Amino acid sequence: AFNKGWEFYRKWFLPLYAIGFIMALIVSMLTKNIDLAGLQNTTDINDITSLLMSMMGTYALVSLISLLFNTLMQYFVVFRPLDDNFSFGEALVTVLRKFYFPLLAIYILLLLLSVIPMILGILLLFIGLLFVIPYVMLFFAMAAPLVMIEGNRIDLSINRLFKLVHKK
């Protein structure tokens, strides 16, 4: 199985790299006007808060674009070996129609569910974070391929995600 995976990535390295490169260019263009040095030079909490609030829209857009490109890459890895007539145009349409919004909903739910243990971890002197972050990241890592393989029903995908993560 490892050899087949290695051969796939060797064969399709350039398209996967191109997807990542295009995403990096878009993110760079969106974030080029953000002044992070201003945060380091400011000591007033109100100024810091207003600076962070001004960046929130840009970072939300960057997150949505990153999710789109990540989902496209995951779709490519999952379905390209199965389809000889694979095209990026059709893949993009399929990702947007079938997987993007269910995956976005799952990520938002996972974020909301992960905030509570993270706050508890902070209250427990950061020790909890050492256990919570890898646990939560496991959910995020498995969500995209699972939605693509299992289908785009959010309830079934979340149920299967919890079963896979908690499998003994």
Image (cartoon, rainbow, N blue to C red):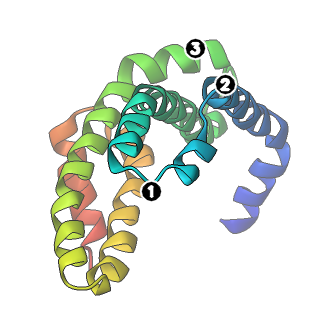
Tell whether 112 sits left or right of 44.
Answer: left
Residue visible at 62% across and 30% down in the picture: 31
Q: Is residue 156 above or below residue 40?
A: above
Mark 3 and mark 1: Cα distance apart in space: 24 Å
At label 2, which amino acid type do we have? Ile
Q: In the drawing, what numbered circle is on residue 141?
A: 1
Q: Which residue extends farthest front?
A: 44
Q: Which mark is residue 90?
A: 3
Structural distance between the alpha carbons of marks 2 and 1: 23 Å
Front in this rendered view, residue 125 or 47: 47
Q: Is residue 77 above or below residue 97?
A: below
Neighbour class for label 3 at 10 Å: few (<14), some, many (≥20)? few
The picture quadrant where one finds residue 148 is top left
Q: Residues within 10 Å of mark 2 (few under 14, many from 20)?
A: some
| Amino acid found under the numbered disc labelled 1 | Ala
Name the amino acid type tagged 3. Answer: Glu
Looking at marks 2 and 1 on the same chain, the residue that comes earlier in the sequence is marked by: 2
